[in-house]
Image (cartoon, rainbow, N blue to C red):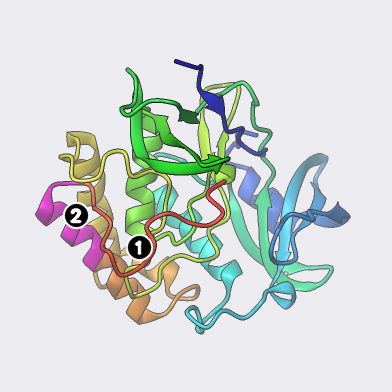
Amino acid sequence: MSAPERIPPRGVTTADPADAVLLAEGELTVRGRIREASNAALYCTVTHEGREAACVYKPVAGERPLWDFPDGTLAGREVAAYQVSEATGWGLVPPTVLRDGPHGEGMCQLWIEATPEAELLALVDREEPGPGWKAVGFAEVGEGRTALLVHADDVRLRRLAVLDAVINNADRKGGHLLPTRDGRLYGIDHGVTFNAEDKLRTLLWGWAGEPLTEEVRDVLEVLGKALAEGGALAASLAPLITRAEIDATRARVASLLASGAHPQPGGRWPAIPWPPV
């Protein structure tokens, strides 16, 4: 039996409470363009009161219109995902703000430097995942061969899977997972989230149908209260996504609590994004 074929993650640094101020109020300087991004994504530095950090700036003017996300902006959805992540207390999304920049209003997010040694996803030549891994499904690897795609049975990934279910992430790819050397895990690229229709597409299906942990249930209870009419999170999301999308987010939290289990693929949409990495 051959060793797992590693699918490497992609790169971004842990934040402190002042990072949001730095991102919102600092001076943005464009250093280059991130070419693999499907929409305009600029690598920048931001400076404020003697502090400097690297960040990603995605101007709204550089977004490609999407037929199934006709309302609002992708930048607003990225900021909304950060706010929901903060409300969970898990800190799974890098500090992200909506601000004016060299090319107009856009999303500005702290750049996180990922560690290439972390192994979260793999392709294995076997029928079942080994210890410490969860099966996603079989994938073609060329020359008529298939391999089992697996992800780590990791509490950080499990939390991210729950966050994705709440925000209805339509594009959780392997390259959006950023583990850091201090043991944290971040998820990035949340422009296609919060749709009122079920569009969950992810590589993190390993817990599908399994009972939610007590920690997850407690966090969902907190989210439900914060998303209620007049709740703090509902108010902070109002400028970023539509009322229907906030209502749908509230309903997804309630549905998760009612079922007591991780969601399973619904069948109406492809369950895994393409390309998966």
Residue 231 can be seen, yes or no: yes
- 154 drawn magenta: no
The answer to which of marks 2 and 1 sits earlier in the sequence is 1
Image position of 54 with respect to 242: above or below: above
Which mark is nearer the camera, 2 or 1?
2
* Quarter of the image with the N terminus in it: top left
**Residue 48 x %, y %:** 79, 48
What residue lies at 74% left-to-right and 73% top-to-bottom?
Answer: 62
| C-alpha separation, residue under disc 2 versus residue under disc 1 | 21 Å
The quadrant holding residue 253 is bottom left
What amino acid is found at the position of numbered circle 2 in the picture? Leu
Q: What span is in magenta? A: 251-261
Residue that carries the numbered disc 1 in the rendered image: 232
**Residue 275 x %, y %:** 56, 54
Find numbered disc 1 in the image and state the secondary structure of the residue it sits on: helix
Q: Main secondary structure of the magenta part?
A: helix
Badge 1: residue crowd in 10 Å (few <14, some 14–19, many ≥20): some
The quadrant holding residue 178 is top right
Q: Going by the image, does 188 lie left or right of 241?
A: right
**Residue 30 x %, y %:** 87, 56
Residue that carries the numbered disc 2 in the rendered image: 256
* Residue situated in front as seen by the camera: 113 or 142: 142
